[in-house]
Every structure is written in structure tokens, then in C-alpha cells.
Amino acid sequence: MVAKLELSDVLAHVDAQRETSLHRLMDYVRHPSISAHNIGIKDVAELLVDMLSKLGLEARLVPSAGHPMVVARWLKAEGAPTVLLYGHYDVQPPDPLDLWLSPPFEPTIRDGRIFARGVADNKGQHFAQILAIESHLKVHGRLPCNVILLLEGEEEIGSPHIADFVRDHRDLLKADLAVTADGPLHPSGRPTLKLGSRGVISFDLHARHASRDVHSGNFGGVVPNPLWTLVHLLATMKNDRGEITIEGFDDDVLAPTEEECEAVARLPLDLDEIKRSLGLSRLDEPAGRDYYERLCFRPTLTINGLHGGYGGPGSKTVLPHEAIAKCDIRLVAAQDTADILRKVEAHVHKHAPEVTVVSHGSGMQPSKTPINSSYAAPIRQAIVAAHGIEPLIYPAGFGSLPGYAFTQILGIDAFVTPYGNADEANHAPNENLKIECFFNGIRTGAALLDTLGKANFG
Amino acid sequence: MVAKLELSDVLAHVDAQRETSLHRLMDYVRHPSISAHNIGIKDVAELLVDMLSKLGLEARLVPSAGHPMVVARWLKAEGAPTVLLYGHYDVQPPDPLDLWLSPPFEPTIRDGRIFARGVADNKGQHFAQILAIESHLKVHGRLPCNVILLLEGEEEIGSPHIADFVRDHRDLLKADLAVTADGPLHPSGRPTLKLGSRGVISFDLHARHASRDVHSGNFGGVVPNPLWTLVHLLATMKNDRGEITIEGFDDDVLAPTEEECEAVARLPLDLDEIKRSLGLSRLDEPAGRDYYERLCFRPTLTINGLHGGYGGPGSKTVLPHEAIAKCDIRLVAAQDTADILRKVEAHVHKHAPEVTVVSHGSGMQPSKTPINSSYAAPIRQAIVAAHGIEPLIYPAGFGSLPGYAFTQILGIDAFVTPYGNADEANHAPNENLKIECFFNGIRTGAALLDTLGKANFG
């Protein structure tokens, strides 16, 4: 017979360790692990395996077709469910460096926040999960449920191998549900629970006409301009009313269910504050669209960057010979990455056959977990236990996480419980994590193991 | 009574001095004089005054509101006409440096060409004029007609002060006609004579929405994207059929006269060769438009550069907060720079009121000299004397030269006699001047002084 494991003891331990935990996080984010540039990946993966082994988990580095995965398991809670905790140990490139107030890999505390690349996205969040596991093991010598920790090294380059990896390691990863701590809390600081995420594909549009740049006077009107080619092509892909006009683009977009609509209607919204915090005078087109509808139920086409020709001071009367637009598309259920990429290619081929489409990997599918999943209740209870407040329920998260690997391949429900502050500035200079968010993350992680262990899934 | 001054003696001198002249040109282009970056301007201006004074011209540096003008006069040919020879001693910035095969300010000879920034645009061309003057003075001790040499130091930044300067120094510059040696010969190598030039204005379109870059997942669909704003604005300014759609843009475009149409119809055209030399598979839209109509009689709207967001390798899921498009417009007679800039501003204000228009100076007006000007004949004779072949007559040159300061302010006819090869790569890496073109330029300049001195303008 197993002794009753009190959560309160674990949370007391978490609170007593705050100072130590903070310094351990700062040590962790000091290590760069930039997947896009293949910097520091192996070092950080090995550091994690070492750390997790010392906690008593069966931890190993498992090769994938790209950067290796860190897998650590603790499966001694017979009869209890198994939760797969997913995170990623890679970070975004830190540029532009000159906009950082303190160096990206020298974590610095200002105004109750830790500033460092990756501190919010995702190191501070999965490190909180690790400390939650550690706290249970330190206090009670065991965990209330079974845990599989899966830490990826390629999330910031689009998780190109997670699907194959999960498919190839079904047994190693056999679990009842998946929980990811990533992304931001609500701007008010309220905890959130997300039941899926938008998918993403990234691609470049490359236009080239002449073999060299020419003088805009001697050749203007004669030599085609790749920037005009991209402008006219892009204008056919999304109109100025915010409608994506790629043929067939919306075919598979699922209309939200009544329950999902009710869920977003309950979400708080302070548009003025959102606009103030971003320095915005208006939201994007279409003007009348509901805020959460934009983020949960609608796909997007974003130009991440567009570059061609002269960009220096003053003027230069040049007609450039090549230009590139870098784009991403956020997909919603039940759009399919391969299908949407085919539609992009067909559209470009029809409207600007001279333009080349170069996709970056196969992208990430959208994922969706039913809003009435039986695991939703214990996760909500855990959040309440840690925060003392009910979480906001989002039918879908806004960003892209590889939850589809769990829902579509493992066939299990997947949830996202973000620990970061809304102004975490992930993917941007001065990325930061509020220290309080980090501590609440550890508490939430600890409570989650407890509520999952005690829940009755009949 | 003035002795008969034989041109043949002068041309023989020019030919005998080829080696020396070539090395003097190479010494001259070794001095950078980049007006956009204010590098070397004063040094080169003083070098010119010194050189011209030593030739026996009354030469001085005359201040303008910007970089100084070099003015050198020889006015002892009583009864003969006075020709104002215009050129510019400033050059384009040399970047991108990594595409130069030899350093831009270390003139290098390869394949019968001198490679150096500014060697064609415009140092090699006005230096040829100077050597032509020198040759007459060396051989005959005098010039057949009066000469005013005006060398500007701001042409590559749009000649912002030439109009005011000419207006303020009418007496100093009092002449009967103006001749500029700038731009390229016909691709076949045949000499050309141009009776005017397109004007130009340059401006930036600056779009900014949020106060910082954001994550395309967490904010895509909510935060307006300045790149989409520029794409949609630009698409309203010129359509994909090549028509400029700024309201009122074409109002003042003069239809070519019958004589002008006949002139361009006589111009040779090898479209296949033009396309081959530029690596083009097609000309710019509109597809059916006559080649020379594009360049002589039609305005253009060129995007010189467009930059915003991520431009590095791979993908980055960022939604940028600002973007800039740098544009120029080539104007034709009788469009007016200030009027067109007002129309651009009104158009932007109507279609994208959040976008800022920043103009670079007041631009350059188009200029036009009647195709039946009485000075056309002696200039043609000079070209024939130097080259042994009739020049091609262009009703208007393609690029922008400050000829309007002569036609509109001094009220005199203005001509352009280019000396550069068609593939001179001006404004681009590996700018070059064929050595043969340089020598023919000196011969043409020498012959021009002769034919103007002997012509009867009764």
C-alpha cells in the first residue's frame, strides 16, 4: 500500500527552494543552444541527460534524423496514468544583437524578470517541469503518476523530425496524455489551458530577372524588377481586407463548435491594453473580426521578411535583380501542411511562374484536443492548486507546438499549460521570464503530477 | 586675322597621347569622391581646379549650398559661340564591395577596359572633354570656340543645388548651348546624340505598426504587418500590367511629336542581344510596348529597395514592426517633380495613411531640346569627324541629367553625347570604361569645339 503523498509538502519544498531554483535556471540559460545555427545543441542535450539521470530518471539521448531528443522516464507508479511532458531545449537565434539591453547569453535580472535568450521559450518552462519532478522525488521519494519527459532540440527550426521520431518510438513514448509548458499566460497573468495549437509552414519566395543590378534610368521600364514581381504576387495571396486569397486555402478550415465558441466568449479581453502594450493604433485587418477568433480559429499568412535592392541611407537609383520574401502560414484544424504548401506552389505557379518557392521543412500540423477531454479536469485542478485561480480555457493555442505528434500519431489528448509572461518577447530581443512565473510554473508542474495521480479516469 | 586651326592636327595629337592620357585617367579615378558619403569631394574638386588652371583656363571652385562646383572658362574666341560643357566629378558609393573583381578605387585594366568606380560615370567622360580642350590649346594655343566647363559634385545624389546654382550664376555661365558627355553609347558601339533626359525623384515609403517585432504565432492575425501594408500600397501605385496607377500621374506626359517618333523608328534594335546581355527572358510589362518608347517617352516607378523583417538563412517566425521601400520615379517632359511628388503623397495618404513618405531632395526635372535645334548639325558633324559614322539621334536620354537647368533656367538648347560603353555597369559593381571609348571621347570633344567654332548660325 502506497502512503498518501501530500502535495502541500511538495509545494512547501518548491517555495523553500526559490533562490536556489532561480540560480540553477540562470546557469541553464547561460548555455546557448541555437538549433538554426547548430550551436551548443549537443552540450545542452548532454547536460540535461546528466541532470535527469541524477534525479533518478531513466534518461538518455535518443538520436533523431536531426538534433537528438532527450528522453527521461519514471514509470514506477503502477495503475496511475502516464503523462508525457514535452518541451524543447533549443532556442531562437539572438539577433539583432544590438537591441539587447544585456547580452542574450548572460542572464540578467531586472524588474523581477530574468532576461536571456531562451529563458521563456522554452528553457525556463521545461526546467520548471524538471524541478517539479525533482521536488516530488526529494520530498516523497517517488512520483504520483508516471512521467515521460521528451525534450526536443529542433522546435525553433520547425520540429522537422518530431513526427518521425514519435512514430519510430511509440513504445518508448507510450503515454495517456501529453502536456506541454510553452508560450505565454494571459496578459493579465491568469493561468491558461490550451487544447491544441495552430500549425505552421515556412517558405521563401525568390524572384530574379536580370543577371545583375542595373541603373534605374538606363534600364527602368525595360528590365523587370523582382521587387515588383513579389509585390504583385503577394498582393494576390492576401488582399488588403486581410483575406487570404490562395485558391482553396480555406477548404479544410473547421468551423469552431458551439462549446469552443462559448469557451472563447468567456475569455477576458482588454483590447485597449493589448494595443497600448504593443504600441498599436489598430488591430490587423479584417477590422471587425473577434480577437480570439483571430488567434484560435483562423489561419494567417505572415511575411516574416522581405529583402531586395538598396537599403542604406539616402537614395540609390538602382534596379535590383533579385529579391526574396520569407513567409509563414499558421494553419488551423483540419488544414494539412502538405496540402497547403501544394496550394501555395500552385498559386505561385499560376500568378508568377518565374518565382521560386523554397519551403523550409515539412512544417508542423495543427493539433486539436476535444474540449471535453477527461484529462481537462485534473489539469484544471492542478492549476487551481498552484495558482489559487481557475485557468482560462483556450480551444487552441496561437503558436505552433508539435502537439499533433501526440494527437495524430500517438492518438492521445494533448494540452498546453504555458508558464511565461505575456510580454516574454520570445523570438525577439530582450526575451524574458518573470521570476514569479517561473516559480508558479514549478508549482503547477508539481500539482499536475499530483492531480493526475489521484484522478479517477474510470 | 585668326589662322586656320586644323582639326586634323589636334586629332593627331590626341592619338599620339593615348598612352599618357590613359595613365592620367587612371590617376584621376584613383581618388574616391563619393558625394553620398561626403568622401574625397573637396580633394578632387581642388585637384580639378589646379589641373584646369594649369591648362590656361580661368578656373575656380564656386561654393553652392552643397558640395562646390568647379567652373573653368576660356572666352577668347570673339564672335564664336560659347559652349557650356557639363560633367560631374562625384561618383556612386561602391558597395556591395564583395562583388568587385578588383578594388573600386584601384583602377585595373582587363580586356581593353578600365575597371574603377566612376571611370564611366562620369570621370572618364569629362576627363575626355578636358583632354580635348588641352589638345587644342597644346596644338594651336587657342580654342575654336568659347568654353565654360561646369563640373558638379552632387550629381549622384540628385543634383540638389544645380538649379539654384545656375540661377544664381547666370552671368558666369552665359552660353549658347550646353553639351554633356555622360551615359552609354548604343550597345552596338555607335555614337549617340540625345536631346534631353528623363527627370527623377527619389523617396522612401516607411511603414511601422507595433513598437517591437512580435512572434508570428502569438500575434499573427492581430498585429498589422508593415510589409503587408507596403505590399498593398505599392500594388495600388503600379499594377501587374506595368501601368502606374497614381492618380493624375500621366496628366502632363507629352505625346512624342511625329519627328520624334521618326527618330526612334530609325534607331537600331537587337532585342535578343539586349536580353542576352542582361540574362533576361522577357522585357518588363507592358509586354507590347516599343523598346525606345519605354526609355524616351515613358515615366517609370522603380522600387530601388525594399527591406523589413528577417533576411537571414532558414526561417524565423517573426512579425516585423517596420519596413521601408525606397523608390524612384523617372519623369518625362512635361511632368514636374514637385507636382509628381505631391501626387505620390496624396496617393499614399489616401490608400495607406499610416505610411510616411520621405523624399530625398527635390529631384531633377526632365529636359527637352527641340529635335530641329540649329546646334544639332555641328554636333553631329563633330561626332562623324571623330568616329567616322553618323550618330544615332535620341529625342530623350533614359537617365537623368541636370539638362533642365540649362533648358529651363538658362533657356539654351542642351545635348548629351555619351562616351561610355553600353555595359559600363555604372551604379553597380565592376563599373568600367572601354579604353577605345575613352579615346573616342577625347576625339569627339576635340571635334566638337572645332565644328562649333566653324559653324554658321546666322
Image (cartoon, coloured by chain):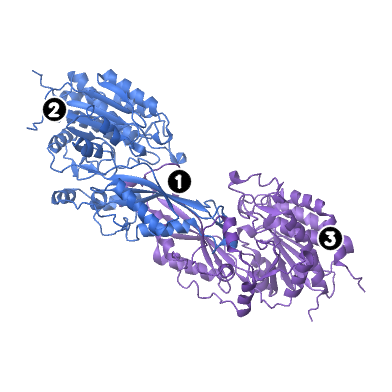
Chain colours: A purple, B blue
Which chain contains the residue that carries disc 3? A
Mark 3 near mark 1, Cβ–Cβ under 8 Å?
no
The three-letter amino acid code for the residue at tag 1 is Gly
**Quick check: can you spot residue B438?**
no
Task: Give the CA separation, mark 3 to mark 1.
Answer: 53 Å
Q: Residues within 10 Å of mark 2 (few under 14, many from 20)?
A: many
Task: Give the CA separation, mark 2 to mark 3.
Answer: 101 Å
Please identify the quarter of the rendering in which residue B196 is found: top left
Residue pushed farthest left? B458
Q: Position of residue A274 (x, y in %)?
A: 59, 60
Label 3: state its secondary structure.
helix
Provide the residue designation for mark 1.
A311
Please identify the quarter of the rendering in which residue B238 is found: bottom left
Q: Position of residue A418 (x, y in %)?
A: 69, 63
> Which sits in the foreground, A437 or A93?
A437
Q: Position of residue A287 (x, y in %)?
A: 49, 66
Compared across the picture, whether A17 is left or right of B332 comes to right
Q: Residues within 10 Å of mark 1 (few under 14, many from 20)?
A: some
Provide the residue designation for mark 2.
B453
Residue A51: mark in rendering? none
The three-letter amino acid code for the residue at tag 2 is Gly
Which chain contains the residue that carries disc 2? B
Q: Position of residue A173 (x, y in %)?
A: 74, 69
Q: Residue at x 63, y 62 (%)?
A: A159
| The N terminus of chain A lies in quadrant | bottom right
